[in-house]
Amino acid sequence: DTGVSQDPRHKITKRGQNVTFRCDPISEHNRLYWYRQTLGQGPEFLTYFQNEAQLEKSRLLSDRFSAERPKGSFSTLEIQRTEQGDSAMYLCASSLGWASGTDEQYFGPGTRLTVT
Amino acid sequence: EDKVVQSPLSLVVHEGDTVTLNCSYEVTNFRSLLWYKQEKKAPTFLFMLTSSGIEKKSGRLSSILDKKELFSILNITATQTGDSAIYLCAVEGGNSGYALNFGKGTSLLVTP
């Protein structure tokens, strides 16, 4: 257990529905990242936050995806009008940031999304 | 385009063997290279490498980075069945700022 938690762990939804995932990072970590992983691939970057500011978004993050990190603590990732291609493991990671001199990212257990 | 390539993609060895996993990269603004182990869950952190030629070691695992030739290796000696996992190489830098660019991973199976 890395100290990063995600909820729910599994989500099955019908195509067209909206889903929201939550990530709670390690408490003193300033940076929070979202990745998506499909079978046989390494994780792919989606977006990241420095405290409450969303500093970068991948081109993978279509208009149907939105992420927030209010007050710089937990984060939510929402997918609107889900499509079957959204089926994947959604991973959250957190890191201390440059103040620590290193920036190891620690991953949560992930949320497995299945869109039927 | 940033690239992280791992080889081999899969490997089967017997308990007690030594394995070497490879990771080559082409990433602008390189900051660090990280190795993770992934079983049937999220990746767990193994090593972070920022300087060439300095070996990092943890038990039977070790890793080294060559920033001139743009590659890293992960060695596992005296393998055990519990080492069976996917080993992911990731590079921090490139066009994605502080995000990690991952390779596809090497799937290692250690048989008794």
Image: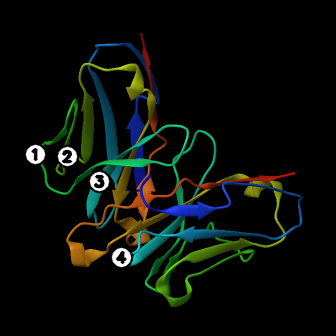
Side of B24 relative to B81 (left or right): left
Q: What label does residue A81 carry, if any?
A: none
Left or right of residue A99, residue A49 in this image? right
Q: Give, as a three-letter code, the residue at label 4.
A: Glu
Residue drawn at point x = 65 percent, y = 72 percent: A77
Amino acid carrying mark 3 in the image: Leu
Secondary structure at badge 1 equals loop
Which residue position is annotated with label 1?
B53
Residue contact between numbered discs 3 and 4, judged by CB atoms under 8 Å: no
| Pointer 4 chain | A
Residue B65 numbered mark, or none: 2
Q: Residue A28: which disc?
A: 4
Q: Are marks 3 and 1 on the same chain?
A: yes
Instruction: Give the spatial CA distance, label 3 vs label 2.
Output: 8 Å
Looking at the image, do the residues carrying marks 1 and 2 touch, with CB atoms under 8 Å apart? yes
Around disc 4, counting alpha carbons within 10 Å, would you say few (fewer than 14), some (14 to 19), or many (20 or more)?
few
Which residue in the rendered view is the most extreme toward the left?
B54
Q: Nearer the viewer, mark 4 or mark 1?
A: 4
Give the percent coordinates (x, y) of residue B37.
40, 41
Quadrant containing the N terminus of chain B is bottom left
Same-chain status of marks 3 and 2: yes
Between the C-alphas of marks 4 and 1, the distance is 32 Å
